[in-house]
Image: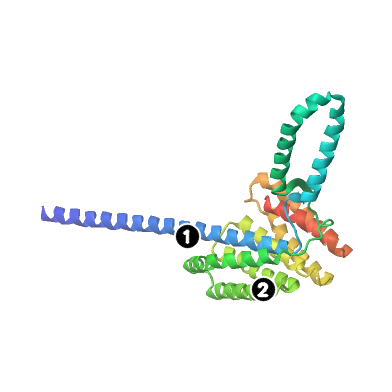
């Protein structure tokens, strides 16, 4: 009887241990999954912001139109009001003089009040303005660029900690933060070419983080492709077409792996194939050595990649 009880206790202890290990293992997996998803969201946020800053250097926007507000001056408004009054007055001469004299006072008061109310603030006119590479003549909005860089500093401590918890290479994490400090310093002095290069240096770490933390293969490959596109784009003002050509060639080589990846959803294959054609068209723009044509194809290519 004692022997049976002893066996029962042993079996019970084994069951408890197995259950405890199972619960602990599942909890650990859930925590790791949650941490991985959180880090992915942070990297994706940073990727979107850095890409946007790179595009801001040449006014590249995904929108084709923007709303432009123009103002009518008070003088223009008064002139328009006087013209309308003159027109109305000439039309009213066909009426009897008695009627005009009896009603003219109240009409004049009403008109005066309306005009005075309008004079208190300028009238505004809203219209759509086309946005394009060939039509844009605006200067870089450095205040906006510097503001965005400063805002992103608030996210760096959290991203750094989460990357460490996923055992991402510490030297890469430290390198990322160092390059970001350089970016802030260069952007402060409003140096376009240097800012473009430093933005690209910061962006270079993002695909490394994605690889190290075991994120989605498709997205990681797209970010790696975009890094080389940005690298070539950052050299555009220097007209170093030979180096740009090498960068775009590297982007094509990396991107082409998606064409033979059987794990990618069939619904995305069309856009992937289209993106490959557009990448080669970008290389053709490099051969043409025309900055405007390059930027047009660059813009369209990024929009396509971002929709995959």
Between 302 and 191, the one lying in front of the other is: 191
The residue that appears at 62% across and 56% down in the rendered structure is 219
Residue at mark 1: 35
The 10 Å Cα crowd at callout 1, few under 14, some 14 to 19, many 20 or more, is some
Q: Is residue 152 left or right of residue 232?
A: left
The residue that appears at 14% across and 53% down in the rendered structure is 5
Regarding residue 224, the answer to whether it shows in the image is no
Regarding residue 141, the answer to whether it shows in the image is yes
Q: How many marks?
A: 2
Q: Between marks 1 and 2, how big is the CA–CA gap?
A: 34 Å
**Colour theme:** rainbow
Image quarter of residue 187: bottom right
- Residue 215 placement (x, y as % from top left): 56, 59
- Residue 220 placement (x, y as % from top left): 62, 60
- Residue 79 placement (x, y as % from top left): 82, 45
First of labels 1, 2 by sequence position: 1
Between 119 and 264, the one lying in front of the other is: 119
Query: Which element is circle 2 on?
Result: helix
Q: Quick check: marks 1 and 2 in contact, CB under 8 Å?
A: no
Query: Which element is circle 1 on?
Result: helix
Q: Which mark is residue 252?
A: none
Q: Which mark is residue 188?
A: 2
The 10 Å Cα crowd at callout 2, few under 14, some 14 to 19, many 20 or more, is some
Q: Is residue 198 left or right of residue 44?
A: right
Between 61 and 78, the one lying in front of the other is: 78
Front tag of 1 and 2: 2
Between 14 and 29, the one lying in front of the other is: 29
The residue that appears at 58% across and 63% down in the rendered structure is 210
């Amino acid at each position: 009887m004692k022997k049976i009880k002893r066996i029962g206790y042993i079996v019970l202890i084994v069951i408890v241990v197995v259950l405890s290990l199972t619960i602990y293992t599942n909890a650990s997996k859930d925590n790791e999954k949650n941490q991985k998803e959180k880090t992915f969201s942070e990297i994706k946020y940073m990727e979107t912001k850095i890409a946007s800053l790179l595009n801001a250097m040449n006014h590249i926007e995904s929108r084709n139109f923007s709303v432009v507000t123009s103002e009518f001056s008070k003088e223009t408004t008064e002139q328009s009001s006087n013209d309308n009054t003159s027109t109305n007055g000439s039309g009213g001469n066909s009426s009897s003089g008695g009627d005009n004299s009896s009603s003219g006072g109240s009409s004049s008061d009403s008109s005066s009040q309306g005009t005075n109310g309008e004079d208190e603030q300028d009238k505004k006119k809203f219209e759509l303005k086309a946005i394009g590479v060939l039509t844009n003549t605006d200067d870089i909005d450095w205040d906006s660029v510097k503001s965005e860089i400063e805002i992103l500093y608030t996210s760096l401590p959290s991203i750094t900690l989460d990357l460490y918890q996923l055992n991402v290479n510490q030297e890469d994490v430290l390198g990322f933060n160092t390059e970001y400090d350089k970016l802030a310093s260069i952007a402060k002095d409003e140096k376009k070419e240097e800012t473009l290069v430093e933005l690209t240096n910061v962006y270079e770490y993002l695909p490394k983080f994605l690889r190290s933390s075991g994120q989605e293969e498709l997205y990681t490959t797209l970010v790696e492709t975009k890094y080389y596109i940005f690298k070539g784009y950052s050299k555009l003002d220097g007209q170093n077409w030979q180096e740009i050509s090498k960068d775009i060639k590297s982007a094509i080589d990396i991107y082409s792996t998606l064409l033979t990846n059987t794990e990618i959803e069939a619904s995305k294959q069309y856009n992937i194939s289209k993106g490959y054609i557009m990448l080669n068209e970008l290389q053709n723009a490099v051969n043409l050595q025309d900055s405007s044509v390059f930027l047009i194809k660059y813009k369209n290519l990024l929009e396509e990649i971002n929709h995959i």
